[in-house]
Protein backbone atom coordinates (compact mmCIF):
# COMPACT_ATOMS: atom_id res chain seq x y z
CA UNK A 1 0.00 0.00 0.00
CA UNK A 2 1.28 3.47 -0.89
CA UNK A 3 1.63 5.93 1.95
CA UNK A 4 0.19 8.85 -0.03
CA UNK A 5 -2.63 9.07 -2.55
CA UNK A 6 -2.72 12.24 -4.63
CA UNK A 7 -5.97 12.87 -6.52
CA UNK A 8 -5.87 15.23 -9.50
CA UNK A 9 -9.01 15.96 -11.51
CA UNK A 10 -8.77 17.51 -14.95
CA UNK A 11 -10.76 18.46 -18.02
CA UNK A 12 -9.18 19.69 -21.26
CA UNK A 13 -6.17 21.36 -19.65
CA UNK A 14 -3.36 18.98 -20.54
CA UNK A 15 -0.66 21.67 -20.60
CA UNK A 16 -1.45 22.78 -17.06
CA UNK A 17 -2.02 19.19 -15.96
CA UNK A 18 1.49 18.16 -16.93
CA UNK A 19 2.98 20.71 -14.52
CA UNK A 20 0.62 19.66 -11.73
CA UNK A 21 1.51 15.99 -12.16
CA UNK A 22 5.22 16.75 -12.21
CA UNK A 23 4.94 18.71 -8.97
CA UNK A 24 3.21 15.72 -7.33
CA UNK A 25 5.71 13.16 -8.61
CA UNK A 26 8.61 15.39 -7.48
CA UNK A 27 7.62 15.22 -3.80
CA UNK A 28 10.55 14.50 -1.49
CA UNK A 29 8.54 11.90 0.41
CA UNK A 30 8.23 9.40 -2.45
CA UNK A 31 5.98 6.37 -1.84
CA UNK A 32 2.94 7.86 -3.54
CA UNK A 33 0.37 7.13 -6.19
CA UNK A 34 -0.91 9.92 -8.41
CA UNK A 35 -4.51 9.30 -9.43
CA UNK A 36 -5.41 11.40 -12.47
CA UNK A 37 -9.15 11.53 -13.10
CA UNK A 38 -9.86 12.66 -16.64
CA UNK A 39 -13.37 14.12 -16.78
CA UNK A 40 -14.19 13.46 -20.46
CA UNK A 41 -11.31 15.49 -21.90
CA UNK A 42 -11.06 15.81 -25.67
CA UNK A 43 -7.45 17.06 -25.79
CA UNK A 44 -4.18 15.13 -25.29
CA UNK A 45 -4.74 14.46 -21.57
CA UNK A 46 -4.76 10.69 -22.02
CA UNK A 47 -1.21 10.69 -23.39
CA UNK A 48 0.24 12.18 -20.21
CA UNK A 49 -0.58 9.32 -17.86
CA UNK A 50 1.77 6.89 -19.58
CA UNK A 51 4.95 8.72 -18.58
CA UNK A 52 5.28 7.29 -15.04
CA UNK A 53 4.16 4.00 -13.44
CA UNK A 54 3.06 5.87 -10.30
CA UNK A 55 0.24 7.48 -12.28
CA UNK A 56 -3.15 5.79 -12.08
CA UNK A 57 -5.27 7.04 -14.97
CA UNK A 58 -9.06 7.08 -14.56
CA UNK A 59 -11.19 8.03 -17.55
CA UNK A 60 -14.76 9.30 -17.21
CA UNK A 61 -16.63 9.18 -20.52
CA UNK A 62 -18.76 12.13 -21.60
CA UNK A 63 -21.99 10.21 -21.00
CA UNK A 64 -20.94 9.58 -17.39
CA UNK A 65 -19.53 13.04 -16.61
CA UNK A 66 -21.17 14.61 -13.54
CA UNK A 67 -18.82 17.42 -12.55
CA UNK A 68 -15.65 17.99 -10.58
CA UNK A 69 -16.73 16.51 -7.27
CA UNK A 70 -17.96 13.32 -8.90
CA UNK A 71 -14.52 13.09 -10.50
CA UNK A 72 -12.79 13.66 -7.16
CA UNK A 73 -14.88 10.94 -5.57
CA UNK A 74 -13.93 8.55 -8.36
CA UNK A 75 -10.32 9.24 -7.47
CA UNK A 76 -11.00 8.68 -3.78
CA UNK A 77 -12.62 5.33 -4.58
CA UNK A 78 -9.38 4.17 -6.20
CA UNK A 79 -7.03 5.54 -3.54
CA UNK A 80 -4.99 3.05 -1.50
CA UNK A 81 -2.76 5.38 0.53
CA UNK A 82 -2.91 5.93 4.27
CA UNK A 83 -3.01 9.68 3.60
CA UNK A 84 -4.85 11.52 0.87
CA UNK A 85 -4.25 14.90 -0.73
CA UNK A 86 -5.85 16.74 -3.62
CA UNK A 87 -4.32 18.85 -6.36
CA UNK A 88 -6.23 20.94 -8.89
CA UNK A 89 -4.87 20.69 -12.42
CA UNK A 90 -3.99 24.40 -12.53
CA UNK A 91 -2.10 24.35 -9.22
CA UNK A 92 1.40 23.15 -8.34
CA UNK A 93 3.03 21.88 -5.15
CA UNK A 94 6.45 22.77 -3.83
CA UNK A 95 8.62 19.62 -3.60
CA UNK A 96 8.48 19.40 0.21
CA UNK A 97 4.74 19.94 0.60
CA UNK A 98 3.80 16.40 1.64
CA UNK A 99 6.95 15.98 3.73
CA UNK A 100 6.22 19.05 5.84
CA UNK A 101 2.55 18.18 6.22
CA UNK A 102 3.39 14.63 7.29
CA UNK A 103 5.84 15.95 9.90
CA UNK A 104 3.14 18.20 11.35
CA UNK A 105 0.63 15.35 11.28
CA UNK A 106 3.06 13.25 13.33
CA UNK A 107 2.74 15.93 16.02
CA UNK A 108 -1.07 15.96 15.75
CA UNK A 109 -2.15 12.44 14.73
CA UNK A 110 -5.55 12.16 13.07
CA UNK A 111 -5.71 15.86 12.22
CA UNK A 112 -6.42 17.66 8.98
CA UNK A 113 -3.26 19.42 7.83
CA UNK A 114 -3.20 22.34 5.41
CA UNK A 115 -0.73 25.06 4.43
CA UNK A 116 -0.27 28.51 2.98
CA UNK A 117 -0.40 29.25 -0.74
CA UNK A 118 0.94 31.66 -3.31
CA UNK A 119 -1.44 33.06 -5.92
CA UNK A 120 0.15 33.58 -9.32
CA UNK A 121 -2.04 36.17 -10.99
CA UNK A 122 -1.79 36.27 -14.76
CA UNK A 123 -3.32 39.15 -16.71
CA UNK A 124 -2.65 41.28 -19.77
CA UNK A 125 -0.36 43.39 -17.58
CA UNK A 126 1.88 40.46 -16.69
CA UNK A 127 2.35 38.16 -13.71
CA UNK A 128 2.22 38.98 -10.00
CA UNK A 129 2.60 36.82 -6.89
CA UNK A 130 0.66 37.11 -3.65
CA UNK A 131 1.32 34.82 -0.69
CA UNK A 132 -1.31 33.97 1.92
CA UNK A 133 -0.35 32.34 5.24
CA UNK A 134 -3.23 31.25 7.52
CA UNK A 135 -3.60 33.17 10.81
CA UNK A 136 -2.84 31.33 14.04
CA UNK A 137 -6.53 31.11 14.94
CA UNK A 138 -6.95 28.58 12.10
CA UNK A 139 -5.38 25.86 14.25
CA UNK A 140 -6.92 23.42 16.71
CA UNK A 141 -10.63 22.85 17.18
CA UNK A 142 -12.28 24.69 14.29
CA UNK A 143 -15.71 23.08 14.59
CA UNK A 144 -17.35 26.53 14.95
CA UNK A 145 -14.88 28.85 13.20
CA UNK A 146 -14.90 26.70 10.05
CA UNK A 147 -18.53 27.66 9.44
CA UNK A 148 -17.80 31.38 9.40
CA UNK A 149 -14.86 31.69 7.02
CA UNK A 150 -13.04 30.14 4.10
CA UNK A 151 -10.06 28.43 5.73
CA UNK A 152 -8.23 26.73 2.87
CA UNK A 153 -8.45 25.34 -0.66
CA UNK A 154 -8.58 21.81 -2.06
CA UNK A 155 -4.93 21.73 -3.15
CA UNK A 156 -3.74 22.57 0.38
CA UNK A 157 -5.54 19.73 2.18
CA UNK A 158 -3.82 16.62 3.58
CA UNK A 159 -5.31 14.13 6.03
CA UNK A 160 -5.70 10.42 6.88
CA UNK A 161 -7.90 8.82 4.25
CA UNK A 162 -10.01 7.09 6.91
CA UNK A 163 -11.48 10.47 7.92
CA UNK A 164 -13.55 10.31 4.75
CA UNK A 165 -15.09 7.09 6.03
CA UNK A 166 -16.38 9.11 8.99
CA UNK A 167 -17.69 12.19 7.18
CA UNK A 168 -18.24 11.09 3.58
CA UNK A 169 -16.69 12.28 0.33
CA UNK A 170 -17.16 15.52 -1.61
CA UNK A 171 -20.78 16.59 -2.08
CA UNK A 172 -21.47 16.00 -5.78
CA UNK A 173 -24.24 18.61 -5.89
CA UNK A 174 -21.69 21.39 -5.41
CA UNK A 175 -19.72 23.20 -8.10
CA UNK A 176 -18.36 25.89 -5.74
CA UNK A 177 -17.10 25.90 -2.15
CA UNK A 178 -16.75 22.12 -2.10
CA UNK A 179 -13.70 22.27 0.18
CA UNK A 180 -15.50 24.64 2.54
CA UNK A 181 -18.41 22.22 2.87
CA UNK A 182 -16.13 19.19 3.28
CA UNK A 183 -14.10 21.04 5.91
CA UNK A 184 -17.27 21.77 7.90
CA UNK A 185 -17.80 18.02 8.21
CA UNK A 186 -14.14 17.24 8.85
CA UNK A 187 -13.93 19.85 11.60
CA UNK A 188 -16.69 18.12 13.54
CA UNK A 189 -14.50 15.00 13.95
CA UNK A 190 -10.89 16.23 13.74
CA UNK A 191 -8.63 19.13 14.61
CA UNK A 192 -7.04 21.33 11.93
CA UNK A 193 -3.37 22.37 11.91
CA UNK A 194 -1.34 24.16 9.26
CA UNK A 195 2.22 24.52 8.05
CA UNK A 196 2.93 28.29 8.14
CA UNK A 197 4.52 28.29 4.71
CA UNK A 198 3.23 28.68 1.16
CA UNK A 199 3.64 25.15 -0.22
CA UNK A 200 1.08 25.48 -3.04
CA UNK A 201 1.13 27.77 -6.08
CA UNK A 202 -2.35 28.59 -7.40
CA UNK A 203 -2.95 30.01 -10.87
CA UNK A 204 -5.30 32.99 -10.67
CA UNK A 205 -6.37 34.16 -14.12
CA UNK A 206 -8.31 37.43 -14.14
CA UNK A 207 -10.95 38.67 -16.57
CA UNK A 208 -11.90 35.16 -17.64
CA UNK A 209 -15.55 36.04 -18.22
CA UNK A 210 -16.63 32.81 -19.85
CA UNK A 211 -15.49 30.83 -16.84
CA UNK A 212 -16.48 33.14 -14.01
CA UNK A 213 -19.34 35.53 -14.73
CA UNK A 214 -21.60 32.86 -16.17
CA UNK A 215 -21.28 30.94 -12.91
CA UNK A 216 -22.10 33.68 -10.41
CA UNK A 217 -25.69 32.44 -10.13
CA UNK A 218 -24.47 28.88 -9.54
CA UNK A 219 -22.13 30.16 -6.83
CA UNK A 220 -25.04 31.84 -5.05
CA UNK A 221 -27.16 28.69 -5.31
CA UNK A 222 -24.30 26.61 -3.93
CA UNK A 223 -23.77 28.79 -0.88
CA UNK A 224 -27.50 28.67 -0.12
CA UNK A 225 -27.49 24.89 -0.49
CA UNK A 226 -24.60 24.55 1.98
CA UNK A 227 -26.38 26.80 4.48
CA UNK A 228 -29.55 24.69 4.24
CA UNK A 229 -27.63 21.41 4.46
CA UNK A 230 -25.91 22.43 7.70
CA UNK A 231 -28.66 24.70 9.07
CA UNK A 232 -28.53 23.08 12.52
CA UNK A 233 -24.81 23.91 12.78
CA UNK A 234 -25.33 27.50 11.64
CA UNK A 235 -28.16 27.88 14.15
CA UNK A 236 -25.59 27.37 16.92
CA UNK A 237 -23.59 30.43 15.88
CA UNK A 238 -23.66 33.69 17.80
CA UNK A 239 -24.61 37.03 16.25
CA UNK A 240 -20.93 37.88 15.85
CA UNK A 241 -20.15 34.53 14.21
CA UNK A 242 -23.08 34.89 11.81
CA UNK A 243 -21.88 38.36 10.89
CA UNK A 244 -18.45 36.91 10.10
CA UNK A 245 -20.07 34.27 7.89
CA UNK A 246 -21.98 36.89 5.88
CA UNK A 247 -18.82 38.99 5.59
CA UNK A 248 -17.13 35.97 4.03
CA UNK A 249 -19.96 35.65 1.49
CA UNK A 250 -19.77 39.32 0.52
CA UNK A 251 -15.98 39.24 0.25
CA UNK A 252 -16.11 36.24 -2.09
CA UNK A 253 -18.88 37.80 -4.19
CA UNK A 254 -16.74 40.93 -4.58
CA UNK A 255 -13.71 38.87 -5.58
CA UNK A 256 -15.59 36.78 -8.14
CA UNK A 257 -17.17 39.79 -9.87
CA UNK A 258 -13.87 41.65 -9.84
CA UNK A 259 -12.00 38.73 -11.42
CA UNK A 260 -14.70 38.47 -14.06
CA UNK A 261 -14.24 42.10 -15.03
CA UNK A 262 -17.83 42.91 -13.96
CA UNK A 263 -16.99 46.36 -12.63
CA UNK A 264 -20.48 47.55 -11.65
CA UNK A 265 -21.25 44.43 -9.62
CA UNK A 266 -17.76 44.45 -8.11
CA UNK A 267 -18.26 48.06 -6.99
CA UNK A 268 -21.65 47.16 -5.50
CA UNK A 269 -20.22 44.30 -3.45
CA UNK A 270 -17.17 46.39 -2.60
CA UNK A 271 -19.40 48.98 -0.91
CA UNK A 272 -21.28 46.28 0.99
CA UNK A 273 -17.97 44.69 1.96
CA UNK A 274 -16.80 47.99 3.45
CA UNK A 275 -19.90 48.27 5.63
CA UNK A 276 -19.88 44.60 6.64
CA UNK A 277 -16.15 44.22 7.34
CA UNK A 278 -14.96 47.54 8.68
CA UNK A 279 -17.68 49.77 10.09
CA UNK A 280 -19.19 47.36 12.67
CA UNK A 281 -15.86 46.18 14.13
CA UNK A 282 -16.17 48.11 17.39
CA UNK A 283 -19.87 47.34 17.72
CA UNK A 284 -19.33 43.59 17.33
CA UNK A 285 -16.87 43.59 20.22
CA UNK A 286 -19.89 44.21 22.45
CA UNK A 287 -21.32 40.75 21.67
Image: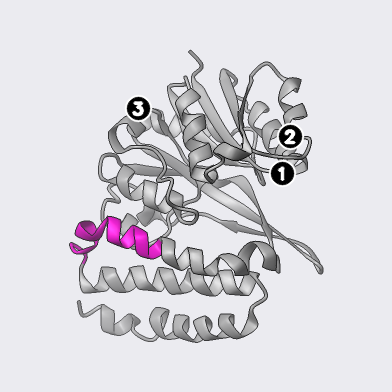
CB-based contact (under 8 Å), mark 3 and mark 1: no
On the image, the x and y values in percent for residue 205 come to 70, 60
- Segment tinted magenta in the rendering: 223-237
Q: Secondary structure at mark 1?
A: loop
Asked if residue 33 is positioned above or below residue 151 in the image, the reply reads above
Classed neighbour count for the residue bearing mark 1: other residues with Cα under 10 Å, few (<14), some (14–19), many (≥20)? some
Residue that carries the numbered disc 3 in the rendered image = 162
On the image, the x and y values in percent for residue 184 come to 33, 50
Residue that carries the numbered disc 1 in the rendered image = 12
Q: Residue at x 31, y 42 (%)?
A: 191
Q: Nearer the viewer, residue 129 or 173?
A: 173
- Calculate the distance from the C-alpha at mark 3 to the C-alpha at mark 1: 31 Å
Residue that carries the numbered disc 2 in the rendered image = 45
- Calculate the distance from the C-alpha at mark 3 to the C-alpha at mark 2: 30 Å
Label for residue 126?
A: none
Q: Secondary structure at mark 2?
A: helix
Most frequent secondary structure within the magenta stretch: helix
Quarter containing the C terminus:
bottom left
**Mark 3 or mark 1, earlier in chain:** 1
Note whether residue 108 is visible: no
CB-based contact (under 8 Å), mark 1 and mark 2: yes
Q: Residue 234 in magenta?
A: yes
Query: Is residue 267 left or right of 146 when viewed as pictured?
Result: right
Amino acid sequence: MNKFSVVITTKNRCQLLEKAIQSALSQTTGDLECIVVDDASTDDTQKIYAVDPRIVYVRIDAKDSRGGNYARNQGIARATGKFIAFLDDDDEWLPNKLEKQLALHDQHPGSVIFCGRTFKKVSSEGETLHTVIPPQKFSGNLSRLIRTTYVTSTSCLFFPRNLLEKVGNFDERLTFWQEYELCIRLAQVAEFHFVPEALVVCLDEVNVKARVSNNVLNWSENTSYIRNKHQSLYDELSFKENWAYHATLVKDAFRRHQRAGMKAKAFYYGVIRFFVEYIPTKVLHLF
